[in-house]
Amino acid sequence: MLRENHRGFKFDWVTIIIYLLLVTFGWLNILSASHVGEVVTYFDTSQLYGKHLVFVGLSFVLIILILSIEAKFYERFASIIYITAMLALVGLFVFGKDVNGARSWYGIGSMTIQPSEFAKFATALAVSKYISDLQTNMKTLQDQLKTLALIIIPAFLILLQNDAGSTIVYASFFFVFYREGLQQIYLIVAISTIVLAIIALKFGVLYAAIFSVAVIGGHLFVKRKKRPSIFKSVIVLAVCIGFSYGVKLFYNHGIKPHQQNRISLWLRLEKDASKLERMKKEEAYNLIQSEKAISSGGFSGKGFLEGTRTTGKFVPEQHTDYIFSTVGEEWGFLGSAFVVVLFMALIIRILYLSESQKSQFSRVYGYCVASILFIHFTINTGMVMGLIPTVGIPLPFFSYGGSGLMGFTILLFIFVKLDSNKINEW
Amino acid sequence: MRKLLLLITVICVGLVFIARLFYLQVYNETPYNLFEDNAIRKVYDYPKRGYVYDRNGTLLVANQPSYDVMVIPREVEPLDTLEFCGLLKISKEEFTKKYAKAKNYSPRLPSVFVPQLSKKDYAVLQEKMRKFDGFYIQKRSLRDYQTTIGANVLGDIGEVNQRIIEKQPYYKMGDLIGKQGVEISYEKTLRGVKGIKFIQKDRFNKNIGPYQNGVHDTLPQPGKDITITIDAKLQEYGELLMKNKRGGIIAIEPSSGEILAMVSGPSYNPNLLVGRDRSKNFSKLYRDSIAKPLFDRALQAQYPPGSPFKVMNALIGLQEGIVDVNDKVTCRMGYYYGSRKLTGCHHHKSPVDMNAGIAQSCNAYFVNIYRRIIDKEDDAGAAMNKWSNHAKSFGLGNFLNNDLSVGRPGRIPDGDYYDRAYGDNRWGSTYIVSNAIGQGEVEATPIQLANMAAAIGNRGYYYTPHIIKSIEGDTIPSKYTTPKKTTIDKQHFEPVIQGMFDVYNKGTAEYLQVPGIDICGKTGTAENFMKIDGIKTQLTDHSIFVAFAPKDNPKIAIAVFVENGYWGSRFAGRMASLMIEKYIKGTITRTDLEDWILTHSLENEYAKPYSGKSFKINGETTLQVVEKQ
């Protein structure tokens, strides 16, 4: 203990400072986006920004708690934490509360808790624990499936609760698996899947087929001296075409109309002018308002609390998922680029720290944290800027919401604790 | 490699995002403009428009409130349509149509339902307004003319059009702006500056509160009252004389350049262009392409000045030293070049000196001295330029550059003009002798001729004719108070003025004398033509008269122009004498002249070219006599 006090607790201050910057800046923007009338006092808990300030306070309490617990605790109790989180998700089907059509909240008095926000770090702990087990080899199919199961369970439960956005987050574990030894072929399959799906939707199955033939043909030509199997190639081609067709079928019949519209808007599939006009008022309304707010900010922004579109509440959900549009309007290019840089810096810092971990558990966990933050940041910011179809997930540390802020805080600070303990590892 | 995948992805995504932000916020950026921000509602507070007074302090133009019935369709509750229509004096069908139009424009935004109710209708409606949800009354300010005269002077105001809005961002849809007369030339002074409140609204178009606590808001600055130089009584008298005639009268005070009267016939009542019937009445006036009531003949009619221009040539001749006042010229009923008669003349005693030349308006005399002026130099072009500069120094041949909303430059040709027409140096004085008698290429507007008379009366200088006398709390531009010198020396004016005096004394205007006033004048009779079915047809001559009075220290200089009035003293001369008497004495002693003018109409004369039949002109026609009103 003495040794730990003397040499340990070397918390990574870079991470902590970035965290504090993000939370503070996030709160200022929530204040802007949510205040109604004059801002009299910041501690007005009848206002959303006042409530969020309470959440920030609670998060700081959590940080102290997390950092004071023995680092090994997280590894040892990973399974229990995971099981608890899964039970909490299952419990929603019985005790949950419907908000906006998604059954993702527990209501306790006037407070609501969203367990899916906490399931993320639980899953990260479980995945880290399983992968770092000496007997686990990510190159074997058996272990791959077992780890996949750890992710599929929460993802599936959340999907059943009608929260498709949060489900997508679990795709981020791919980066973790890949880092820990997943074969190259998976990466190729993953990229091909995305590319093929986009081509099939945007240009049709025929073009997807032509693209597949070209790529596979090119591959055969390059590798011709090694006598590759023509038969295998034909099967791959068939799978590709089948997949493209499947995507199209799934797009037309497998998803809900509003999801279909979001994709259609993103890929600009809708050609019917009158329908497009209607979409502008409905599905695309948020997106258009958010883009307008961002571009109206210009280079240096309109200034704190001066955003006219923010004050006028032109962007619905601006304090939660669309918080970045407030940054864009009030702080301009300088402010929004600063936020992007902060997130990049945080993620890169975590990656760098992960690679320097001595225990595999810490490393894998660090990777999980980086991946989850990355996917959240990419999808949320990309959506607000109109680069990615609308997916309702929050911007870490920024968006309004207690469960979200605390979930991410726990996720990050467990890693800070693990990292601080690395000197004691060998 | 495995370690790098996420790192590289993070960096790529970050760069793409920054590029996107750059595109949205910097590359695509238009500078932020509060006025274009549709999240901010702009509410305007219109100041009182300035009043217009005449030179004696008589109020001519004031304001009156007008009431528009406005509607916000989505706030309308079921109502007693029959009663409402009755109050508004519209039919049920109109109601349905107007309502549909307003709803189509926007269910949330107010639109004008019935514009400009009369005060009486408003009084009745106001009592019952609370019964009709979604409708309300908006007050606007309209012009209230205290007079029925001076439409061409006072002008009118109307809603701005898209072109003005684009050019002058001060104006917004629905704002009022001066359209004619002093309303347009003193628009900025009269209108003041409207106040503006910026109000933050939300996406449902609801007001939230003042934007940034109102730091950008401004208070309206009231419009300033102006006093114009017009003498309302003289103006009214001029319009009375101009009844049943077409033409212009313009009277100037020589000692200041102030325009005393500016009459254009036919005229109209300025009240026609106020209120609900404005657009109907305006298009009626606008479409009258024969009488052209919106065409200001005092300012815009550009005619050959005829004989009054002869005095100009007399002055130039004296200044250039090519003629002595006593030089005599023989007139054989015209001017002969060899055996060719270049111009005719009427019967009078011969030979004539300068005094008789002016008094009798002898064509031969002036062709003679004009030729001397042009032939003085070896190069006709150079002499022509010299001549042209003299004439231009009297404000002829160019815009007067004053505060009237319309005008024409007239035309004083110079050497280049004829070089272009005939070829370099391929012309001489005999080509252009018509200029000697104010025909040919010379053209002028009535205001230019009145100004010329003022400059002669002043013996060599004039003040730019202007309409503004004073502005509340402001001074008038110095260009109106600085005299402009002509190129003619002072001593040359006396013989010419004596000639003009003798026009009244014993010349062409002998029977127009006004007892007790020494008037100097000059008659003019100008030939004119019109195309009828593509054929150039001569019409009855225009009657022109230019005068100033009294002879010394003149108080008034005047130009009268009556279309197809035949000879100069017939209509224009009479009217000029009456105007002078009215202004100087305040009463009319020459009631015989007045009666004659008021009982004689030229309407038949004007109808002739449009009758489709062949017609006679000048002396071969009879004058139409009308009842005095």
Image (cartoon, rainbow, N blue to C red):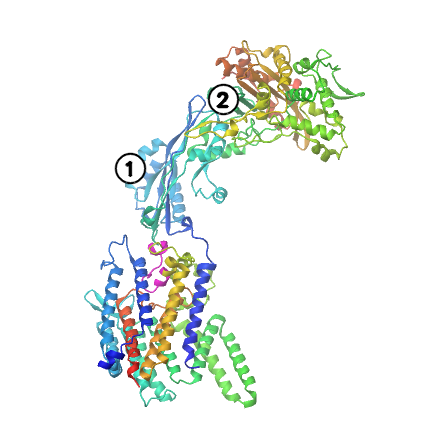
Give the x, y percent position of residue A73.
Answer: 24, 81
Which label lies toward us, 1 or 2? 2
Residue A109 lies in quadrant:
bottom left
- Name the foreground residue: B126 vs B100: B126
- Do circles 1 and 2 both sit on a common chain? yes
- Identify the residue position indicated by label 1 in the image: B128
- Identify the residue position indicated by label 2 in the image: B235
Q: Quadrant of the N terminus of chain B?
A: bottom left
Give the x, y percent position of residue A82.
Answer: 26, 80
Report the residue that reaches farthest toward the right: B339
Q: Residue at x 28, y 66 (%)?
A: A401
Residue A310 among those drawn in magenta: yes
Give the x, y percent position of residue A356.
Answer: 36, 80
Residue A134 lies in quadrant:
bottom left
Residue stretch in magenta: A307-326
* Left or right: where B3 falls relative to B237: left
Few, some or many residues within 10 Å of mark 2 (<14, 14–19, 20+): many
Few, some or many residues within 10 Å of mark 1 (<14, 14–19, 20+): few
- Name the foreground residue: B388 vs B582: B388
Residue B315 lies in quadrant:
top right
Q: Is residue B421 above or below residue B506?
A: below
Report if the CB atoms under discs 1 and 2 are less than 8 Å apart. Answer: no
- Name the foreground residue: B85 vs A4: A4
* Left or right: where B320 falls relative to A241: right
* Left or right: where B128 falls relative to B516: left
Q: Amino acid under label 1?
A: Lys
Q: Is residue B76 above or below residue B397?
A: below
Q: Earlier in the sequence, mark 1 or mark 2?
A: 1
* Left or right: where B217 falls relative to B615: left
* Chain of the residue where label 2 is placed in the rendered structure: B
Q: Of the numbered discs in the image, which one, if any, rests on residue B338?
A: none
Tell me the distance, in whole angstroms, between the alpha carbons under discs 1 and 2.
45 Å
